[in-house]
Image (cartoon, helix red, strand yellow):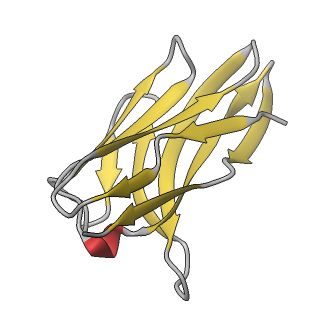
C-alpha cells in the first residue's frame, strides 16, 4: 500500500493562510486523482477539492476562490493552498490519492492534519 504523509496544518487567525502538503512514497508510482477532504467535530467527512492527472481541479462551493489544489508529479506530492481562512474551515484535513503502483491500483488516505482557524 502507498503511504501518504501530510504536513502543514496548524493554528491560524481568520483571514490567514496555510498550505497543506501530501507526499506519496514509493517508486513506480503514478497518481490519477488526488483530493483533500475534511472532517469537523460532529460532522461527516466532506470533499474539499480534487485534481485529476490532467490537472483539472474541482472544488466544494464553500472553498471556491479561496483554496487552490495543485500537484507536483515529479515529487508525487499534492498541495492545498488555503487563503482567507474562516473559523468554519476548522477541521481535520485528509488527503486521498488514487493511482497505480507498478501497475496495481491503489487508493490511500493520509493520517490527517489539524487546521484550526481562530482568533
Instruction: Indicate left or right for 9 with 56 as reference.
Output: right
Residue 44 position by quadrant: bottom right
Q: Residue at x 15, y 58 (%)?
A: 15
Which is more toward the observer, 68 or 17? 17
Q: Residue 51: image x %, image y %? A: 41, 40
Q: Quadrant of the C terminus?
A: bottom left
The correct choice, above or below, for 31 with respect to 7 in the image is above
2 horizontally vs 44: left or right: right
Q: Position of residue 5 (x, y in %)?
A: 66, 36
In this rendering, the count of numbered labels is: 0
Viewer-side residue, 13 vs 19: 13
Residue 94 at what x, y percent from top left? 57, 55
Q: Is residue 11 left or right of residue 6?
A: left
Residue plotted at (50% across, 17% down): 73
The answer to which of 77 and 51 lies nearer the viewer is 77
Q: Is residue 74 above or below residue 77?
A: above
**Residue furthest bottom in the image:** 42
Amino acid at each position: 500500500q502507498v503511504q501518504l504523509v501530510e504536513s502543514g496544518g496548524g493554528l491560524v487567525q481568520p483571514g490567514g493562510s496555510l498550505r497543506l502538503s501530501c507526499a506519496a512514497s514509493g517508486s513506480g508510482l503514478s497518481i490519477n486523482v488526488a483530493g483533500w477532504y475534511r472532517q469537523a467535530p460532529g460532522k461527516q467527512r466532506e470533499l474539499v477539492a480534487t485534481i485529476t492527472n490532467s490537472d483539472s481541479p474541482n472544488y466544494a462551493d464553500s472553498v471556491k476562490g479561496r483554496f487552490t489544489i495543485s500537484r507536483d508529479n515529479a515529487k508525487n506530492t499534492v498541495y492545498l493552498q488555503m487563503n482567507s481562512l474562516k473559523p468554519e474551515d476548522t477541521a481535520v484535513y485528509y488527503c486521498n490519492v488514487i493511482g497505480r503502483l507498478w501497475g496495481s491500483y491503489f487508493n490511500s488516505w493520509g493520517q490527517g492534519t489539524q487546521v484550526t482557524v481562530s482568533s
